[in-house]
Amino acid sequence: MSRFEEVMTRCGVLFGTSGARGLVADMSDALCYTYATAFLQSVAGAADKVLVGHDLRPSSPRIAAACAAAIQDSGRELVYAGALPTPALAFYAAQLGAPAMVVTGSHIPFDRNGIKFYRAEGEISKADEQAMLNALVSLPDAVTPAVLPLADPLASEAYLRRYLDFFEPGALAGLRVAVYEHSSVGRDVLRRILEGLGAQVLALGRTDVFVPIDTEAVRPQDVAQARQWAREHTFDALLSTDGDADRPLIGDENGEWLRGDVVGILCAQYLQAQVVVTPVSSNTAAEKCGAFSAVARTRIGSPYVIAGMEAALAQGDALVVGYEANGGFLLGSDVVQKGRRLSALPTRDAVLPMLALLCMARQRACKLSALTQDLPARYTASDRLQDFATHKSQRLIQQLLAAPAALALTLAPQAGAVMQTDQTDGLRVTFESGDIVHLRPSGNAPELRCYAEAETPARAQLLCDACLAQVVTAAGRQNG
């Protein structure tokens, strides 16, 4: 028997920002079985049933079958929900009062995958992760994966009813909504929700080949494709998600993608939230717009946002919500509008912000593109360097902190003096001009992420691109 942390370290599949992530080649049946065993021992408690679901990556059913074997070998009942959005699986698990395991790599590259873990109340905490790390386990020599049964149809129906019962019948009647389906696990249930609320749905870009959509660092080809579709078709909105459908990608009638942190502000306004919890990387328009009584900042990752929401709720705050820069929206409190109740769902969700923005545009009798007109003129951009080792990212940040002159030259040489540095998560620097540049090692893959904020979209993009170019140049000199 060994501490699970030692097993993880040997195998190279580690906890990331949210859940376990690693190369598919390293995620053997035996390791996934052991991950599930550690969760069942240390977090699931006396639960007599455990839910399992997954996304549409080719490797996901195999990993789910290994986790299912651990559940069955522990004497618990397996509830197999099949391929569904992560928030749909979390919602159904909460209704059952059961813990859950969701096999998904979210937006990360195709050669990777992951497992997310849920208590019946929601995502596990960092303390729960530590309990799993301390669990005593044995890595089996061989595992016979479970034969996955037919998926429980009630899981998708519960998620469908969640939104059809909250939003008014016909709330989207008369709207033509395009859905970029790609390989999103949410593509079918999203269509059912939109049509259930009266929208006409135009399906675009469906594929059986997995597409790693990152809603924070949208690929140039997806930017170009959205604009092309807007020229070819007439629609009121263009909707998509990442692979496991917990992060929205929302485009306006012109095929212009909205930034996720702007989507979060608008959704919070629609719900009339009093307190917003969001990571340090999100747009400062949250504070500057004056719509909320409090805005709390956290490290990046849904576990930190959830902890922030729990702290706000403990203080008695009325309506508490959270969102991330990727657009994923977390509902910390029940919401009641016109006698209809939407229960709290403290995990990232893509559907709620989509429906909120469509209904907000209808309330204001405006196009989706006009929703941002009343927000402060603050714009964000983000991108990443892939295959950039975490230790290289950490070393770069330490070098910049040790050399203030190099810090300004690397991050934003034309932005004036450094006014503030923030190390809540990575290195975030505010300059005399008001420009902000933020470097952070990804918690899920060997990537260095850059976030920038400025008074115009072009300036934010220029800051982001220039900073990453400087990093590449500096890394080349060191390697040379």
Image (spheres, rainbow, N blue to C red):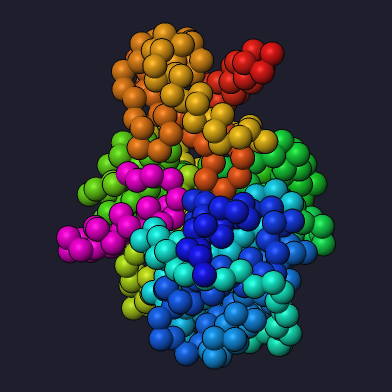
- The residue located at (28%, 46%) in the rendering is 295
Residue 53 pos. (x, y %): 62, 74
Instruction: Mark yes or no: residue 140 visible.
Output: yes
Q: Is residue 409 left or right of residue 32?
A: left
Vertical order, 378 against 166 (above or below) = above
Vertical order, 343 against 181 (above or below) = below
Residue 271 pos. (x, y %): 37, 60
Instruction: Mark yes or no: residue 157 visible.
Output: no
- The residue located at (59%, 86%) in the rendering is 73
- Seen from the viewer's position, the closer of residues 393 and 363 is 393
Q: Residue furthest left?
A: 315
- Seen from the viewer's position, the closer of residues 284 and 35 is 35
Q: Which image quadrant for residue 476?
A: top right
Q: Residue furthest right?
A: 208
Name the quarter where the C terminus is drawn.
top right
Q: Residue furthest front?
A: 1
The part of the chain drawn in magenta is: 297-323
**Residue 300 part of the magenta segment:** yes
Residue 113 pos. (x, y %): 66, 58
Q: Is residue 441 left or right of residue 265?
A: right
- Seen from the viewer's position, the closer of residues 431 and 65 is 65
**Residue 192 part of the magenta segment:** no
- The residue located at (47%, 90%) in the rendering is 48
Residue 229 pos. (x, y %): 76, 47
Report the number of discs. Answer: 0
- The residue located at (63%, 66%) in the rendering is 31
